[in-house]
Image (cartoon, rainbow, N blue to C red):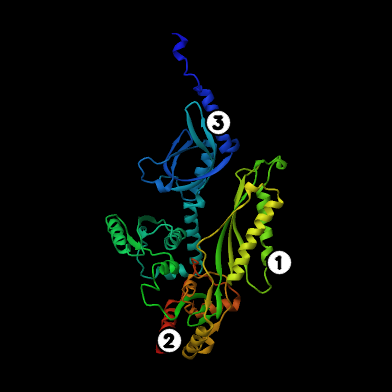
Amino acid sequence: MSDSLFEEVPGREVLSIAAFYDQVTAALDVAFPAHGDLWVRGEVQKCTESRGHAYIDLIDPDETGARTPSVLNVKCWQRTWAPLKRELADSGLVLAPGMTVSIRGQVDLYKARGSLSLVLQELDVTALLGRLAKERQELLDALAAEGLLDAQRRLDLPVVPLRIGLVASPGTEGCNDFLGQLLSSGFGFQVTVARALVQGDRAPAEVAGAVAALDTMDLDVICVVRGGGSKAMLADGLFTRFPKPEVCLAFHDSADAPAGQITYTSGYSSANADSVDITVRGIGGHGAHPQKTKDPVLLAAQIVVALQTIVSRETRPGEAVVVTVGTIHGGTKNNIIPDEVKLQLTVRTFGDESRTQTLNAIKRIVNGCAVTAGVPADLMPVIKFGADYTPSLYNDPALTERLVSLFGAEFGATNVVAKEAGTGAEDFSRYGRTADKIPICMFNVGAVNPAVYAAAKKDGTALPSLHSSKWAPDAEPAIKTGITALTLAALDLLAH
């Protein structure tokens, strides 16, 4: 056969199979330097064993049920799989479809079969599903040690509904809070989400349609979660679609006071809460040749330390400001200097001037550190301030004083106690931040069993905090106190 049959069109580049794989390998080396380790999270679609090796197919959890989900083939050789399988068995776990796992592995291009996969080096079930089982057992052990488990066994409680239908707007505060509580509970909840607008004129029809759709499924309970708090309610026309209030009152349970007691703070009660995301950029390279790089890991470390000078050197003594770096993530391997490191901050202030000063200082310090490190202008840090900050809560002093006098007459002066402002956040504050400048006040109602409170104060035992799995409010006296106080306040304010 003549070679002329294989003559190519002039100007067209045609690769041999070997050259094709050379280019693919080069691209992989750029995306995953030296085919280094990386972490991947996915849901197990299939897991099989053959000759001591394990072969796992992973998909993204949000693609479960999709007709053509993206699949990652994972290989786990016998030397890794055998001890891992024993570790799973010791934890009472079996790798099975539906389990969401995080794995560390290396990208593997097997040219003989034209396949791309991940060779598993480590599987961290504890980080996700296994963590829930572990935390659940720890919680049960703690409850048993405190005698609460036996006390709960004597209560006539229904079986925990594990199959939950959720009507919500995904991504909202309410939806995230609800799912977060389920995740941290330790129970194996199966949640089916029906997306719906839960606020506004279209909400009734969408919620009804979502509930009807979920009602056709085999579920234990259907929950409708309306999220967004005060911000969403104000945006939905709370002060325009309905009569505008002259004052706004609220109560919150307290894990720091005995049931029957009311605590309060006049003026600033809780802080502004801002989230800040910082991407520290540099020029990566080999860890053995740092002089050829602009190391973002070192720069990030310098930034973390420098940010603390905002409180110690730029804030007036006695003024409360908190700058906390909550997360720092960067790099993939011990001998590789990465191109970027990510920081996540929470910032707490009280006054608007203090907030502006602190956020400006963060921007100045971060950029200043980068300039000092010689980072090029086109690689300066990316700083993102969260758009949805929670403003500080300011209790109107005159309104607070009036209600303190009222509550003192009803509950006794010793049961109405002033407390210091805290750096937590409370979105009730937004009701006092509108153009109407409506006076607001939030009180706290003690909910700790008085005997437990007294014993803790005597021996120095730390009481469980709000949202803790061990928080067990003394419900009846706390609710009675709150209802009585709000009723007294409403009658007094309406009468004048």
Foreground pick, 144 / 265: 265
Numbered circle sitting on residue 313: 1
- For the residue carrying disc 2, how many other residues have a C-alpha within 10 Å: few (<14), some (14-19), or many (20+)? some
Q: At which x and y percent is residue 313?
A: 71, 66
Residue 358 occupies quadrant: bottom right
Sequence-wise first label, 1 or 3: 3
Of circles 2 and 3, the one toward us is: 2
CB of mark 1 within 8 Å of CB of mark 3? Answer: no
Q: Tell me which residue sits at (60%, 66%) in the image.
A: 356
Q: At which x and y percent is residue 104?
A: 54, 43
Q: Tell me which residue sits at (44%, 12%) in the image.
A: 5
CB of mark 1 within 8 Å of CB of mark 2? Answer: no
Residue highlighted by disc 2: 493
Residue highlighted by disc 3: 25
Q: Amino acid at mark 1?
A: Arg
CB of mark 2 within 8 Å of CB of mark 3? Answer: no
Image height check: is 455 above or below 94? below
- Gap in angstroms between the C-alphas marked 1 and 3: 52 Å
Image height check: is 17 above or below 79? above
Image height check: is 381 above or below 248? above
Callout 2: SS: helix
